[in-house]
Image (tube, rainbow, N blue to C red):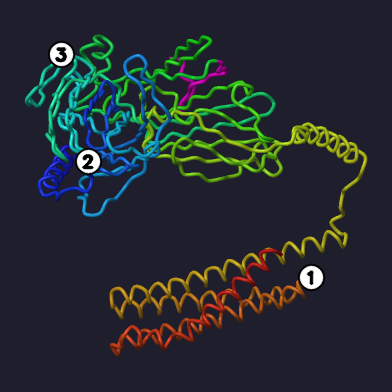
Amino acid sequence: MKKNSSVVVDLLLLLLAITVLATPAFSDLVLSKVERRIDVTSQIARVTKTLKVVNSGSESVSEFTLTFPKFLSNNLAYLSVSHSEGKGKAKRSLANLSVKEAHPKGMPDSISFYSVSLPKPLSKGDTLTLEVVAAFTNVLQPFPEKITQRDIHLVMLQESAQYLSPYVVESQSLSIKLPNARIESYSKLENTKVQGSEIKYGPYKNLAQYSYAPIVVHFESKAAFAVAERLVREIEVSHWGNVQVTEHYNLVHRGAQLKGEFSRLEYQDRPNPQGVSAFRHLLARLPPRAHSIYYRDDIGNISTSQMQSDSKKTELLIEPRFPLFGGWKTFFTIGYGLPLSDFLFASEGKRFLDISFGSPMIDLVTEKLIVQVVLPEGSKDISVTTPFAVKQSHEIKYSHLDIAGRPVVVLEKNNVVPDHNQKIQVYYKFSNINLLSEPLMLITGFFVLFITCIIYTRADFSISKSSAAYLAKLQWDEVLATLQEVQNIIQKCLAAHDKLEASLRDLSRTGDIQTCKAARKSTDSLLKDLSKELRPLLASLQSFPSASQISPKVEELVAKERELQEKLMAKHTTVVEGYEKKSSGRDIENRIASQQQKIIALRQEVDDLLEFIDEI
């Protein structure tokens, strides 16, 4: 009930905001007719609105304002606004208009505002028809939230019978299309009627600004509440004629959770009454010439899938290893190849990939979608065009026979619905000469391999264990091993320094002086032990003739580390004394300022020396 109670609280805040709302500034426009249609036959609530806008003011208007209750706009996945011309069969929609979120001053937080740029200023007395399409996720709340295997799946929709708008509405109607005619309950207001699986409210006349009449519809839904918590789509382009698409799904059923135990016997014996809240199949509509299709999970290939294809589409009906009830999860991967000629084109000296953005799964909601477009090695001057805002970044992927790696365009978007499955374009420059790099690399590699084999079979590479070169190698190996031990001890000393610094931070937070002193005592003891371990290693290095040039650097490193220890101990003493004398924080900082600068400089010198030794 947590989600439902949260929506109720938001609804109460909205109603309170509307009742105390001052006279709005949106007064030049009037909505002469509003037709709203809500389709909840799937887990996505799709709202379409036809708004007939009239300018009743004296000045031209170039912007229109849309409003949504905050509890709905929080789940707004897709929003588009277009204007239409003509009537009846001659009616046609024109290009989408620019929509951006707005924050008018003096408006309550419980209402979200969106500003729509009109195609041309609307003069006094002129009329414009707008078509609004919005898709909402997570607005159909399971009620009850937990059901048994044999219970039907009921969900609840909360909306308003009257259109929430900053403008006066002369006439408005609402229709709600349900999955079927089984309705548990619905709000009965004036001018309400039910026709089969459709509920109609209105028409309502002469509605004031910000009119709101909350309604609740409780109905049965057999739709698959399939949600991809994370979906990674990798689209790899090969100029040898193929586009390989691999999709990794992390899927969960977001419907009412299963209460009690699951009975496989009852589910298979009577599948219709038992487990109606579960979904068994998912349908993916792939491009028409998709090939080499596979479907697998962590265990292996899953054979329970069917594929049908024709000249217009390829449909893949996949079946998970087990039916998914509410709250259950599954992980799987589908992959397929596409002909390069269907998706790669040329324009103005560039190539561009024209491919769909979202998942091919029907009615799937994706909480986090990551699209990785892997371009051929050598691609440059890369740009992306998308019909909506996405987060964009670039990476490098290394595959077989790669040298510099393949550039990867990474596109990320949250709360993705099928409406986002639109074409994106990835533009890049690529020279055909780069196609020869891999064949030439293979030829060169085989040639070098054959030459190496010939030389190896004919040459004697044996080394006598008594030779000077062999003995020198053994001595150098001992030097390297000693250097490694020195590095490890110095790293332990630096870790002890960090622990000492952490005790000071804890002291500033808790004021516990005794704990801070105990930390210093422990650190001091550890550093003394580490110092003892260093002595024989330094002596060993000095005994090796081959380490004559390295030894001074190692001794300098040890000296700098000891000096750093002394400065840290001095700083620690100063801070603890300050806390014991109850000095102010600013006074303590002033006293240790010069020490801190020296500590930073010494630490940098130690890191530089460690890096020098590491390169050896």
The foreground one among 532 and 67 is 67
Q: Position of residue 414 (x, y in %)?
A: 39, 39
* Earlier residue among tags 2 and 3: 2
Q: Closer to the N terminus: mark 3 or mark 1?
A: 3
In this rendered view, identify the residue nearer to me: 512 or 421. 421
Q: Secondary structure at mark 1?
A: helix
Q: From this viewpoint, which residue is outermost toward the right?
A: 458
Magenta span has 303? yes
Corner quadrant of residue 239: top right
Picture quadrant of residue 530: bottom right
**Helix, strand or loop for disc 2:** helix
Label 3, on which residue? 195
Q: Nearer the viewer, mark 1 or mark 2?
A: 2
Q: Is residue 164 left or right of residue 392?
A: left
Find residue 71 and name its label. Answer: 2
Q: Earlier in the sequence, mark 1 or mark 2?
A: 2
Q: What range is drawn magenta here? A: 289-304
Is residue 601 rendered magenta in the image? no
Q: How far across and how far down the image is residue 369, in percent?
A: 43, 36
Q: Residue at label 1?
A: 546
Which image quarter holds the C terminus? bottom right
Q: Position of residue 564 (x, y in %)?
A: 53, 80
Residue 445 location, quadrant: top right
Question: For mark 2, does the 10 Å Cα neighbourhood hold few (<14), some (14 to 19), or many (20 or more) residues?
Answer: many
- SS assignment at label 3: strand
Res. 259 visible in picture: yes
